[in-house]
Image (tube, grey):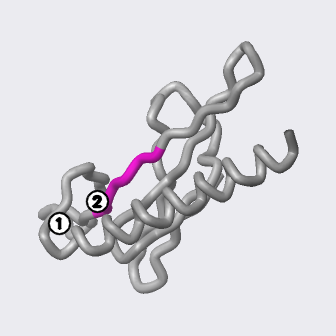
Amino acid sequence: MSQVSYPNDDRSDQIPAPDAESKKPPYKSKRFDRVDAAIWSKNHEDGRTSYSVTFSRSYRVEHENDVPEWKRATSFDLRDVPHLRIAAEWALHELLLKTDKSSEQS
């Protein structure tokens, strides 16, 4: 599974799948500052594959026992918006490349 690492923190978690039941890793994922982008693939019974994109960000909650807890949100602060834009452009680029490669193989 795609591991998200945080070099200067004590956290390490995985980008959650859109379907909580699913343990399948994302097709591709990438981090842009606090914004995580993940591209998910879904295989259909008729042989088609469709893709979806999720965006999230991590934040830390301090507790009285000094043990921080990392949580994930799908809302973004103003400082995240430029990174969200770059993440969306990256996802679009990856999906367009995937589409181009699929059409070349047909």
Residue 9 x, y percent position in the rendering: 39, 79
- Say few, some or many: other residues with alpha carbon within 10 Å of mark 1 (under 14 / 14 to 19 / 20 or more): few
- For the residue marked with disc 1, what is the amino acid? Glu
Residue 60 x, y percent position in the rendering: 24, 65
Considering every residue shown, the one lying at the far right of the view is 105
Is residue 45 or residue 38 the one in the foreground? 45
Q: CA distance from mark 2 to mark 1?
A: 7 Å
Whichever of labels 2 and 1 marks the residue nearer the N terminus, that label is: 1
Whether residue 70 appears in magenta in the rendering, the answer is no
Considering every residue shown, the one lying at the far top of the view is 45
Whether residue 55 appears in magenta in the rendering, the answer is yes
Magenta residue span: 53-58
Q: Secondary structure at mark 1?
A: loop
Left or right of 24 in this view: 39: left
Residue denoted by label 1: 62
Residue at x-position 66% and y-position 58%? 97
Residue at x-position 43% and y-position 65%? 89
Proximity of marks 2 and 1: CB atoms separated by less than 8 Å: no
* In the rendered image, the vertical position of residue 73 relative to residue 3, given as above or below: above
Left or right of 96 in this view: 101: right
Is residue 54 or residue 49 the one in the foreground? 49
Q: Which mark is residue 69?
A: 2
